[in-house]
């Protein structure tokens, strides 16, 4: 400011001096030197003001054009103005850019969300949505922005939810891609925010609903399985209490009661095995189990089982690599092997042949297979056999002491050992159940010494 006053004063002094020199040189006697100096100072002031105005106008034009970069280069007060304004504009631009980047990152994070997100305006028109929402509701960004959400999603349950306007809870509805063979269920929740706007969240709850349905089915199945023998037991107890039976009849009833109790025991034992399989860490790949003693134990148990079931022995053929060892849990492997051998014994009439094999493959893996000449299984049942409590023939399964959990246990054990269960069957001809072990869990015993028999906890 001082510099500005100084230049103004210098301008005036220069004007006054020039006018005084001019008056004394060319207009001697006509104009006094003082008046000439005053006039010169006034004219100089006028020029100074005009040039100042021009610089001011240049700055104003630059501001009006909104060109943040090319500010007029000037000195003095106007130059200072221009500089400061330019710095302010630059810092504002930087801040806006940072805000823009943050907004883009935020939107990218919303895009990455596995849940559907849509922003709706006061009239429930779509302002923005992410890819999950597009997938859930079949939306298209080019076509559906600014459309009323209710016009695009026509599910009656959702329409009622929108109409009621009570967004305290979520609503369940099928996704756009929902089909009978591949159901996709959504939980949709609207959250009002700001001045009448809404945030719509959608979540795929198909797996959750399926797990809940499975849990319900499981509890219903277990209750049913236990209720049946309990009812029978109750009936026998009542008979024993009310009727005057002779010794032979009493013994027969007690026998039947023991059968029901053993059925419940098998069920509880299988349920415990399943829950242990689900809850325990995966079997180690370093604990080697000798296959020969394991299968010898299965053979003895199977012979006993067939005697009890059919009164005569079946032809049990065991064909295995005696030096073969499997890495994993002896208890689990025994459970899986005996379940398959036991099934073959139960679903194959006496006198027929059951062939059990355990051999190394060329790729270093090994397979365990049980082949029978039993009733066989129709192809439509095969994919469901490993479901809990799934039975092809309920009465045959129950009559032979089945719980409906055997193959579920086998599948679990196979998965825990990195192995795969496969089933091939022809009704009326027989079945072949095979577990294929990966090379990482198979070796041939380093010494010829047969390993000690593993301690087994599961018995039929
Ligand atoms: P269960 O205790 O009823 O045998 P599983 O899970 O072991 O239960 O087997 C499921 C069903 O698969 C059985 O009920 C039976 O119908 C069928 N199944 C299993 N193994 C055989 C087999 N070797 N031959 C014929 N059917 C079989």
Image: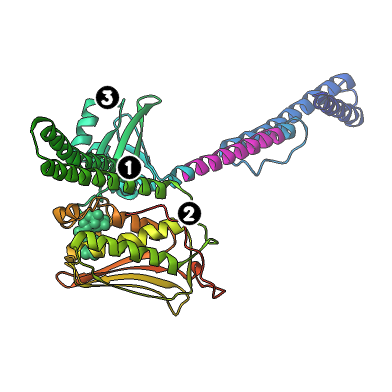
Q: In which quarter of the image is the C terminus?
A: bottom left
> Which residue occupies 16% across, 65% down?
378
Farthest front residue in view: 247
105 within the magenta span: yes
Point out residue 203 in the picture as x, y percentages from the top left corner. Answer: 34, 41
Which of disc 1 and disc 3 is earlier in sequence? 3
Residue 54 picture quarter = top right
Which of disc 3 and disc 2 is earlier in sequence? 3
Taking depth in this image into account, of 432 and 235 the one nearest to the observer is 235
Helix, strand or loop status at disc 3: loop
| Residue 137 visible, this angle | no
Which is closer to the viewer, label 2 or label 3?
A: 2
Give the Cα distance between marks 2 and 3.
Answer: 48 Å
Where residue 282 is drawn, which disc sits there?
A: 2
Which of disc 1 and disc 2 is earlier in sequence? 1
Q: Crowding near pointer 1: few (<14 within 10 Å), some, many (20+)?
A: few
> Which residue occupies 77% across, 27% down?
43
Magenta residue span: 82-108
Q: Name the residue under label 3.
A: 166
């Amino acid at each position: 400011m001082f510099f500005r006053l100084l230049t103004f004063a210098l301008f005036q002094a220069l004007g006054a001096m020039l006018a005084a020199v001019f008056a004394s040189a060319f207009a001697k006697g006509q104009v006094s030197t003082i008046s000439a100096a005053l006039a010169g100072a006034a004219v100089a002031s006028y020029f100074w003001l005009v040039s100042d105005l021009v610089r001011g106008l240049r700055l104003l034009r630059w501001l009006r054009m909104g060109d943040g970069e090319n500010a007029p280069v000037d000195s003095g007060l106007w130059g200072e103005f221009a500089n400061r304004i330019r710095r302010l504009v630059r810092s504002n631009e930087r801040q806006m850019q940072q805000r823009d980047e943050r907004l883009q990152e935020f939107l990218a994070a919303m895009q990455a969300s596995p849940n559907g997100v849509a922003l709706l305006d006061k009239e429930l028109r779509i302002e923005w949505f992410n890819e999950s929402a597009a997938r859930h509701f079949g939306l298209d960004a080019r076509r559906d922005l600014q459309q009323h959400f209710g016009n695009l999603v026509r599910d009656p349950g959702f329409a009622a939810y929108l109409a009621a306007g009570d967004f305290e809870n979520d609503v369940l509805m099928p996704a756009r891609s929902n089909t009978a063979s591949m159901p996709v269920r959504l939980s949709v929740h609207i959250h009002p925010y700001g001045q009448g706007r809404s945030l719509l969240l959608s979540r795929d709850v198909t797996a959750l609903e399926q797990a809940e349905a499975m849990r319900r089915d499981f509890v219903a199945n277990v209750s049913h399985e236990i209720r049946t023998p309990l009812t029978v037991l109750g009936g026998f107890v009542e008979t024993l209490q009310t009727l005057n039976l002779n010794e032979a009849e009493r013994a027969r009833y007690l026998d039947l009661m023991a059968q029901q109790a053993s059925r419940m025991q098998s069920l509880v034992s299988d349920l415990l095995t399943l829950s242990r399989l689900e809850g325990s860490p995966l079997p180690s790949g370093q604990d080697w189990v000798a296959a020969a003693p394991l299968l010898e134990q299965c053979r003895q148990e199977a012979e006993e089982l067939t005697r009890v079931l059919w009164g005569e022995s079946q032809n049990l053929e065991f064909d295995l690599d005696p030096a073969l060892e499997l890495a994993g849990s002896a208890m689990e492997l025994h459970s899986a092997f005996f379940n398959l051998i036991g099934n073959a014994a139960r679903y194959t009439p006496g006198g027929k042949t059951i062939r059990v094999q355990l051999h190394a493959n060329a790729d270093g893996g090994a397979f365990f297979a049980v082949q029978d000449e039993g009733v066989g299984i129709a192809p439509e049942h095969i994919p469901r056999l490993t479901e809990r409590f799934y039975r092809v023939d309920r009465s045959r399964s129950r009559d032979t002491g089945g719980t409906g959990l055997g193959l579920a246990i086998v599948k679990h054990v196979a998965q825990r050992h990195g192995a795969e269960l496969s089933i091939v069957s022809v009704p009326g001809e027989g079945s072949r159940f095979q577990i294929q072990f990966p090379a990482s869990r198979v070796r041939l015993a380093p010494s010829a010494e047969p390993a000690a028999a593993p301690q087994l906890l599961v018995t039929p």
